[in-house]
Image (cartoon, rainbow, N blue to C red):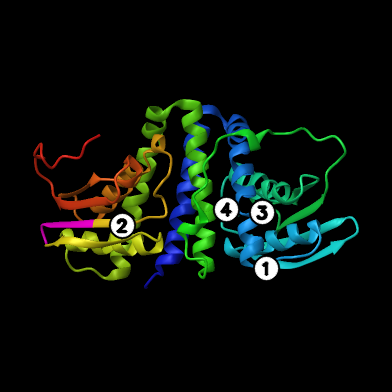
Amino acid sequence: MAIDNIDFAFYLIVEWMQDTLEAFIGQVGPQKAIEIMRPYFLFAGASGDQFAIQEYKIDGSDLEKIVSVMQEENIDLRKELGPYEITPFGARCDILNCNFKNSIPEMCELICVAAANGLCEGINTGYHCIIPMKMTFGAPHCRWIITKKPLIVNSDGYREKALYVIPRKQVDKAIRDKHGLMIFTACWIQQILAIIETLGAKRTMEILSPCMRSSGLSAGLRIEKSLDLHKQDAIAISSVLDFINEGLSQKGTNALYEPETVIKEIVDCSLAGSPPEIEVCLLLEQFTNGACEAINPNYELFHTKAMCRGDKTCIRVIRRKKQLDYDTKPNR
């Protein structure tokens, strides 16, 4: 059965977010992981307020704006919503279905509670969001409530942190699905930054690389079946990766397209400009090599140029494995 590349991109980003959090929990424990990542998700939640207000022409009181932005963001994240109500005491809404309903509770705490509170505070610091019912704890549905904060509230200080959110201008605003993808992608970047700040870049790569390779392996198998590929050469591998590229808003052209070698120049990527310490291209290399392995373990993938390392474009090479020559081996 064919799969949609946008649907699959959503699936991948959600999987990467959960795998990243679980890997971090394995290092520091669940309570510490939430404590460290919470400011990053607050920042990510607050970053999209003005975009949503302008894009969806949202007006009204601060509470009405918060509720409207929350609704639009939840729709963009493909959550199934019940009707919401606004009262003199606040607002509430039930979420009937969610990408994270079967995930670990810590994921819900970050993306659905911390990011939601960043969204509230981005509009008015006097409001907050609480979620008394959560599907991750066995409830039939989630419920969020937005109300004014108590008079005494501790500040998380997240506004002073020099964090990174991918610019919305890199996404086609006309496509709602891509906006939702960008929200999740920005949250994933925040997760990685939080881990790097805690464990260092080297250790972060060590714990996330196996997750990404495993994700690529399962993704490659699934897409190969969906595309009904009958060959297992570089062109077949490129077809799988092109399917993923399109879903993740990565654009480029092939410089060489042969069964033994495919070279593609990627000129536009939603992850371009991410902090260099993340080395997101290396994580994506792990993912794509997992996809290579799923189709034909005799092939490999590497980048001779990468935007996350400061190059203007990415040059991706898929070829049959052999000893790399010094003049073609990518610089690390």
Q: Which residue is mark 3?
A: 135
Residue 109 image point, x, y percent: 65, 44
Q: CA distance from mark 2 to mark 1?
A: 32 Å
- Location of residue 35 (image quadrant): top right
Residue at which label 4 appears: 102
17 falls in the magenta region? no
Dot placed on the residue nearer the N-terminal end, 3 or 1: 1
Q: Give the residue type that dot 3 points to.
A: Met
What quarter of the picture does the C terminus occupy? Answer: top left
Residue 97 appears in the picture as rendered: no
The crowd level at tag 1 (other Cα within 10 Å; few <14, some 14-19, many 20+) is: few
Label 4 is placed on what type of residue? Asn
Disc 1: which residue: 57
Query: Which quarter of the figure has residue 63?
Result: bottom right
Which residue has dot 2 on it? Answer: 267
Q: Is 36 or 295 nearer to us in this picture?
A: 36
Q: Rate crowding at label 2 as few (under 14), some (14 to 19) or many (20 or more) other CA atoms within 10 Å.
A: some
Q: Secondary structure at mark 2?
A: strand
Give the Cα separation between the discs numbered 3 and 1: 31 Å
In primary-sequence order, the first of circles 1 and 4 is: 1
Q: Quadrant of residue 70?
A: bottom right
Left or right: where 231 falls relative to 109 = left
Residue at 29% across, 70% down: 227
| Residue with the most extreme right position | 88
- How packed mark 4 is, by other alpha carbons closer than 10 Å (few <14, some 14-19, many 20 or more), is few
Range covered by the magenta-colored residues: 259-264
Q: Residue at x 46, y 26 (%)?
A: 199
Say what amino acid the circle numbered 1 marks.
Lys
Distance Cα–Cα, label 3 vs label 2: 41 Å
Q: Position of residue 6 (x, y in %)?
A: 44, 66
